[in-house]
Amino acid sequence: MKTVIIGANHAGIACANTLLDTYPDTEVVMIDRNSNLSYLGCGTALWVGRQIDGYENLFYTTADNFRKKGAKIYMESVVSDIDFINQVVHFTNKAGEKSAETYDKLVLATGSKPIVPNIPGKDLDGIHFLKLFQEGLAVDLDLSRDDVKTVAVIGAGYIGVEIAEAAKRRGKHVLLFDAMPTSLASYYDPEFATKMDENLEQHGISLHFGELATEYKGDGHVTQLVTDKATYDVDLVINAIGFTANSDLGAEHLDTFKNGAYLVDKHQKTSDDSVYAVGDCATIYSNALDDTTYIALATNAVRSGIVAGHNIGGTVLDAIGVQGSNGISIFGYNMVSTGLSVTAAEKAGIDVDYTDFEDLQKPGFIKENALVKIRIVYEKSSRRVIGAQLASTEDISATIHMFSLAIQEHVTIDELKLLDIFFLPHFNQPYNYITMAALGAK
Ligand SMILES: Cc1cc2nc3c(=O)[nH]c(=O)nc-3n(C[C@H](O)[C@H](O)[C@H](O)COP(=O)(O)OP(=O)(O)OC[C@H]3O[C@@H](n4cnc5c(N)ncnc54)[C@H](O)[C@@H]3O)c2cc1C
Ligand SMILES: NC(=O)c1ccc[n+]([C@@H]2O[C@H](COP(=O)([O-])OP(=O)(O)OC[C@H]3O[C@@H](n4cnc5c(N)ncnc54)[C@H](O)[C@@H]3O)[C@@H](O)[C@H]2O)c1
């Protein structure tokens, strides 16, 4: 059995490792257009903001590691065409040489691409995206220039907020724009997102929400950003208005979701029996929505790669769906969420209620202590938990995993009320915030 994997980043790597480690008789061929693989984009803001020493440790494997395991791997090779009928992948290397590989099974792991704001001036110099390692390098280099004083970040989602913090840490004047009225609006309800907004403002970031960029101006290099409200002098722009699936290769042959992602089943199989799709180029099943959706996260990429690897290798393994669990930590303020916010649930047509609670993490007699804010979202009719949000300067990150499992297992808000949660003053209160929030549910 010969498997060709197009895309050797997180999803493709997870699939290749599963096949190579568990099914040694499988022949694996990997093809990627990039010169590097396994870059953890989550570290870009950390090294650009000088919170870690450098980017070297943000790569967790190499092409040679795959060669050692017996795979054939082509880097800097762009797949231009797939003959799905004869099962052949055509690609071209950096030197312009054309090659082809036949397959028994094909894995599409081509990931995502940043959405480009289609406005005048978008091709000026000094306008960046932040998907690839190389793009992080370019931003880092520009931030090192003394004449770059003002940075505009378009999009206050995860990438935008993280890179705004990084640019501020590099001493720049930072303007952060979003079409929505708050930052992080896709992940948190306004009661939580505004806490992050206060945090950003307290650290000197200038917020421009509900404001749309309409034009970039400059003579070769960007010097001004025009929005529907004002014109700003800027030296650098970073676009971060979301990702969409990179699915051009198979879009005509395979069934796709509304954003173009390949529609996959529980085995990561597409509408073609020989073709699987994993990671950001594929759909994913949301247990909160109880429906197919699109969530671009490295965590989902890895899990879906493992599922495809086992099914191709011969072990039937069903994907169990995801909750879209996520987290962010900005200037020491931590926020985590899973499932749906009230806003997202309403948008999806789910009738929900929610319960909020806020208290110190630990008993008052403990000095190192901080407020924790929690919201649990549940469906009115079934009372199943479908979302949770937490915010604190304490590390509350592990709590969200429990809510992720609760959503996956259809736990109701009433079942959470008397859940056995341990108490130790070093960690939490006897009347801890999860129990108190659950008990407060209508
Ligand atoms: C700045 C940043 C921070 C992030 N932080 C987090 C985080 O903290 N947590 C989290 O869970 N997620 C995070 N993400 C999202 C995460 O990086 C993506 O979800 C993840 O990279 C998806 O992995 P993937 O392998 O599916 O796709 P990709 O990483 O997009 O990889 C696709 C691969 O396919 C190759 N390819 C595409 N087309 C072709 C072609 N025609 N021929 C050959 N090769 C091709 C590409 O070169 C690439 O290597 C972040 C992303 C960014 C950009
Ligand atoms: N900490 C993490 O887990 C982490 C970190 C970085 C990236 N990621 C993932 O990578 C993917 C891409 O991140 P992202 O930040 O680009 O996307 P995102 O979806 O997190 O945020 C995009 C933001 O852009 C805004 N927006 C959309 N169109 C706009 C427009 N025309 N003008 C102004 N604002 C506009 C949206 O309201 C949204 O707030 C996401 O799936 C994200 O979850 C995750």
Image (spheres, helix red, strand yellow):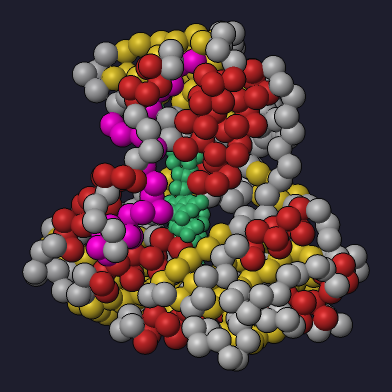
- Quadrant for residue 125, please give it: bottom left
x, y (%) of residue 175? 31, 76
> Against 427, is 250 above or below?
above
Q: Is residue 251 visible?
A: no
Q: Position of residue 42 (x, y in %)?
A: 41, 54
Asked whether 30 falls inside the magenta stretch, the response is yes
Q: Which quadrant does ligand 1 occupy?
A: top left
Looking at the image, which residue is at 63% across and 87% down?
363
Examine the rendering and report whether any part of residue 420 can be seen: yes
Q: In the image, is residue 102 part of the stretch drawn in magenta? A: no
Q: At which x and y percent is residue 326?
A: 56, 60
- Residue at position x 59%, y 20% from top? 22
Instruction: Place residue 336 in its image quadrant.
Output: bottom right
Dividing the picture into quadrants, the one containing residue 203 is: bottom left
First to last magenta residue range = 28-50
Residue 162 as seen in the image, left or right of residue 343 = left
- Residue positioned 74% across, 83% down in the render: 431
Left or right of 364 on screen, residue 178:
left
